[in-house]
Image (cartoon, coloured by chain):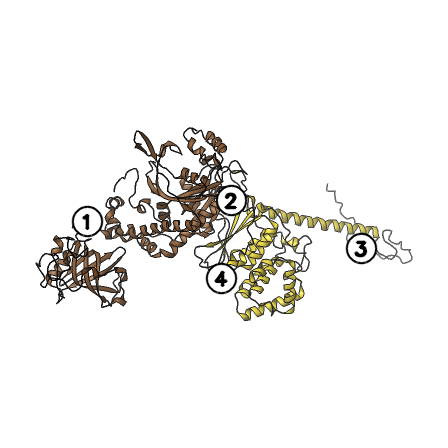
Amino acid sequence: MPMYQVKPVSGSHVKTDLPTCMYAVPNVHALQNGEVEPAVKALEARQDEIMRKLYELKAAVEGLAKTVTTPDADLDLTVSSSSSLSSQSPTSTTFRGTTDLDALLGKVTILKLDLGALRDIVINANPAQPPLTLLVLHSVLCQRYRVLSTVHVHSSASSVPPQLLSCLGPRHPDSYARQMFQLGFTLIWKDVPKLQMKFSVQNMCPVEGEANVARFLFKLLSPYPSDPAVATLVDSWVDTAFFQLAEGSSKERATVLRALNAALGRNPWLAGPEFSLADIACYCCVLQSASASSAPTNVQRWIKACENLGHFGPAKLYLK
Amino acid sequence: MSRSSICLAALSAPVAANKLGPPSPACQAQPSGTGGGRGGGTGGREGLSCTDRVLVRVQDLIPEKADQLIWLRARVHTSRAKGKQCFLVLRQQQFNLQALVAVGDRASKQMVKFAANITKESIVDVEAFVRTVEQKIESCSQQDVELHIERIFVISQAEPRLPLQLEDAVRPDGDGEEEGRATVNQDTKLDNRVIDLRTTTSQAIFRLQSGVCQLFRDTLTEKGFVEIQTPKIISAASEGGANVFTVSYFKTSAYLAQSPQLYKQMCICGDFEKVFCVGPVFRAEDSNTHRHLTEFVGLDIEMAFSYHYHEVIDSITDTMVRIFKGLRDNFQTEIQTVNKQFPSEPFKFLEPTLRLEYTEAVAMLHEAGVEMGDEEDLSTPNEKLLGRLVKEKYDTDFYVLDKYPLAVRPFYTMPDPNNPKYSNSYDMFMRGEEILSGAQRVHDAQLLTDRANHHQIDLEKIKAYIDSFRYGAPPHGGGGIGLERVCMLYLGLHNIRQTSMFPRDPKRLTP
């Protein structure tokens, strides 16, 4: 309730001369050396802290609200701006992501009954350019989910070497009952100019290019890093691998190898301290371009590290 | 040897009994052209006897044979006089070439007139020189050579008015309307099948059909199958009496077999393990559609398996893939010939064959907006839509749909042990249309009786069938395809009457 304001009796400050003969009483609210009392300071500090937390909470809630209402919005950048390239969120580790395929690929529902039918990923590849990255990702997928893998030869493909026919491993003993599998991986050797993946014919157009299919498959295993800078770095390495390492001239390859060397000098893996799709893609392309033996030291060390992880068995097997 | 001889006698005395044997009675050359003597065996014969004469095939006439003098028997496809010359197109099955009679010291004006007046489709014997041409003859199959005729004889003359013209019969449907040229109605073609079969398209189609049959036999024999012949006159209708033809059989009546199934199964129980049979199948359905006939040729397979009925599916699909490969590799000419009149996409398939389950198919249809229950049978439009969806996703025209719901299959189908709503049965599709319906059969007499009771079938009628399983029967399965339908779908044609030589349907009993 506003109080009645009394007009100042006297005007503005009048200069008064304080008598020097009087004894000045020290400030009862202050300490001896003129500092503010610690309790007050502590109070102030606590207040500041509470205010800061409040603001942070507010920002976080706003960010979440945006994510909920906007379908494709990433997390509000103001929240993650605090984390820089060097610090990784403590919760992400290799290949630990949601096992909920329904959320990732969309539930297969039929008139409110979930028939649990097989979700089949169809990949059309040219036998002249076998996709090593996808073979590696397939073997990782098999460890995570129940995958029914089949290899077919299309009538347009003239002759396919036998090792390509068995590149997805031996036939699963349960393969007579397709319903029992969560995911289907159908590889068709066909005379196509560019590798192609088809999944949901009604909702998705075909995905072209080994890099893009690799990204799709990787996202089934674990989400991309939430930090957009890291995610972009991963993407850029994947593209470098497929465009310059695999398809480029020898000069381009040499440049890429030097870039790899430099990046691996700073970090154990290409995109920072964590293993990522960038490592898979670059490893496979390095192996396919047969420049593994002539690579610089950091790259060699990294190749050995990749092999130790054990995911790359199928790639090495094929190349033998 | 006299050059300019025409034997008009040949026209009046076809294949007269003479000492010279089958070649035309007019082997004897006449020194002067017209009005020569009768073509009998008397008179001075030429040095060569006619049995030494070798008739060359049109397809063998290539530039390498230039300047040779050859004999040829072919039909006159067209004949056209132009002043002092007459152009003939001579045809043998799929091949034709141009031939020329020109007035000169070899041929008289009357001979040219004679040649021009030979009716179309007549069979002629021709002695001619093979000559190369500077400009390719686009309209013939032999484009680099033509014949310069020395002698020409008519072996069998055709009536001047033909019920249909061959060029019209081969014309693609779209062309006819635009340029005002006629195409021939299918019914006319079928009524005059003898002439229609002479067209290049028909020749190609039926040669391919013969190839299918041949490949079927060869592939299965190689896999260790035994060919059997089953009776077509049977005593009882096995699958319900509505769709069988009745024949009078002495004092009683009998039926024409709807499928050789019962006998195939009896052969399996008789320890033949793997059998197949090729024979007619009679279905008395009053279906006037583009893909039903009342009589067609069934290629049926039945085999005993060791552990799982998928062995049967694998065997059948492998046979089909081998047939497709054989057609693709050895019958390209025929396929291209048919495509000229009936253009279509080449047939695509995967190896090993794609196998989808019924639930997946229903899910795909649901995704595409079709409403159907998960135990409902697929209607024909749904089958076609499913074919298109599968083609879009997997790029194959041939696939197997496995694990049909039990409710829509016949009583002798083995139910799925893991899920009683479904059965161990499958259908195979080509270009979205069903070509084979098969299953694992119930081989236990008691289970068979139970299933028959469930379907409310009179057990008395099928007593003989159930009896065959009472004395030890191995687990077995199989299926049957229709030869005409497979050809029709492989070539991308739209009516099964095009692939049946003398089709039978509710409205047609002749020729």
Give the residue number, with chain letter if any, for mark 2.
Answer: B306
Residue beneath the point at 26% across and 59% down:
B57
Of the two numbered discs 2 and 3 in the rendering, the one whose residue sits closer to the viewer: 2
User: What kind of residue is marked 4?
Assistant: Ala
User: What kind of residue is marked 2?
Assistant: Ser
| Quadrant of res B382 | top left
**Counting other residues with Cα less than 10 Å from the Cα at mark 1, is it few (<14), some (14-19), or many (20 or more)?**
few
User: What kind of residue is marked 1?
Assistant: Leu
Q: Are marks 1 and 2 in contact (CB under 8 Å)?
A: no
The image quadrant where one finds the N terminus of chain B is bottom left
Which numbered marker is on residue B162? 1
Give the residue number, with chain letter if any, for mark 3.
Answer: A14
| Quadrant of res A273 | bottom right
Chain for disc number 2: B
Chain for disc number 3: A
* Colour-to-chain, brown: B
The CA distance from mark 2 to mark 3 is 116 Å
Give the residue number, with chain letter if any, for mark 4.
Answer: A128
Of the two numbered discs 4 and 2 in the rendering, the one whose residue sits closer to the viewer: 2
| Quadrant of res A211 | bottom right
- How far from the left and from the top, in percent, is residue B23? 19, 57
Asked if labels 1 and 2 share a chain, the reply is: yes
**Counting other residues with Cα less than 10 Å from the Cα at mark 2, is it few (<14), some (14-19), or many (20 or more)?**
few
Circle 1 SS class = loop
